[in-house]
Amino acid sequence: MNTPLDNPVLRVEDLEVRYGNLAVPAVNRVNFEVRRGEILGLVGESGCGKSTAAMSILRLLHPPGRVTHGRVLLDGIDLLAMGTREHRALCWKTISLVPQGAMNALNPVLRVENQIADAIAAHEDTRSKGPLTPRINELLALVGLPSRVRRLYPHELSGGMRQRVCIAMAVALRPPLVIADEPTSALDVVVQRVVAQSLLDIKNRLGNSMLLIGHDMGLMAQLADRVAIMYAGRLVEIAPVADVFRAPRHPYTRQLIESTPTIGQRRPLAVNEGGPPGLGTRTAGCPFAPRCPHAMPRCANEPPAMAQCGEDWQAACHWSAQP
Ligand SMILES: Nc1ncnc2c1ncn2[C@@H]1O[C@H](COP(=O)(O)OP(=O)(O)OP(=O)(O)O)[C@@H](O)[C@H]1O
Ligand SMILES: [Mg+2]
């Protein structure tokens, strides 16, 4: 019998992406899978390569960015190897994107109903289908918006409502996989929770899988089943979210968790100095070593590989791998 583990929706294998001739790849031999019905969180600080990975998976990367290695298997079929026409026919129906900053990219002169209708028409032959209004109402209801929103223009909506319209567009054709790039980052805390809840409601109603990109571990705790932590273009830890919160293996993961504020917090936030190395600087060892409180001599020279450290748990860290 096949289990969800045998048959992931998406498998990313050894993905490497470079910008121009920069010394270091923006995405550096990354491997992960999105399992059926799960929300996989992809987390890391600004510039670690999350959007580059997402855009590469969807073949939406612009030059000078280019995929230099790897495969992206959607239901076992390599998206990177297929013809443009074949790929276009597949996109949006099987995999869709809520892009970073989507809510600010809505067309200001189109009513909500026309934006959603255009998204549907671009990927489906709408001539043979009935009127779109009932479908649009249903999509709006799915993201918790009343049907009167259909007739409004983007400037008449709050940020949270605009973001929910973008989510409605991404799920219009019921794709089994949705990639949501920082869907709540531009919103205030209360609205973040509302939008996060609508992502969860959609997943529960439609049964889709989701790659949820963000840098907020609190959001991941609320939504994700597993999290993949990225640092300087590499994956450093991947595991079920509860395990990661209970006992993070990678010191970077620990710092991400400790830098998440909680209500009534008395301890200072663990935000460490400095930032990840830029793409112009090659590092011989672990890219996190200069900021790592546990760095050992070996860490400066030898990049740690992802290794199994629990049943469904991998991390790339010499220190935590010690007996
Ligand atoms: N067009 C480009 N040309 C050159 N370098 C780029 C380009 N776009 C992104 N980069 C670099 O690639 C790296 C990864 O960027 P990316 O936007 O994927 O990060 P991110 O994790 O999505 O960050 P954020 O949280 O800010 O959205 C960064 O070092 C960035 O400066
Ligand atoms: Mg990004």
Image (cartoon, rainbow, N blue to C red):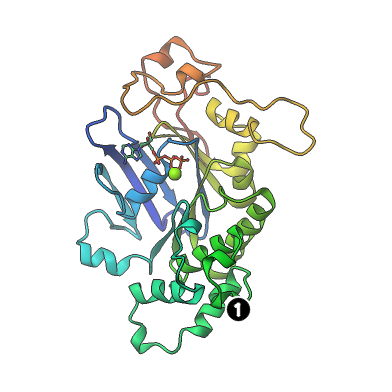
Residue name at image x 61 percent, y 47 percent: 219
**In the figure, 309 relative to 126: above or below?**
above
Q: Nearer the viewer, residue 228 or 143?
A: 143
Q: Farthest residue in the top direction? A: 297
Residue name at image x 65 percent, y 36 percent: 260
Q: At label 1, which amino acid type do we have?
A: Ser
Residue 41, image x, y percentages: 52, 47
Ligand 2 resides in the quarter of the picture at: top left
Query: Would residue 4 be seen by someone viewing this image from the given angle?
Result: no
Residue name at image x 46 percent, y 17 percent: 290
Residue name at image x 63 percent, y 75 percent: 146
Image quadrant where residue 148 sits: bottom right
Q: Nearer the viewer, residue 35 or 108?
A: 108
Which quadrant is home to the N terminus? bottom left
**How many C-alpha atoms fall within 10 Å of the one at disc 1: few (<14), some, or many (≥20)?**
some
Residue 2, image x, y percentages: 44, 60
Q: Secondary structure at mark 1?
A: helix
Q: Which residue is mark 1?
A: 147
**In the figure, 174 relative to 231: above or below?**
below
Q: Farthest residue in the right direction? A: 264
**In the figure, 47 relative to 148: above or below?**
above
Horizontally, residue 233 falls left or right of residue 250, namely: left
Residue 22, image x, y percentages: 26, 30
Horizontally, residue 120 falls left or right of residue 39, namely: left
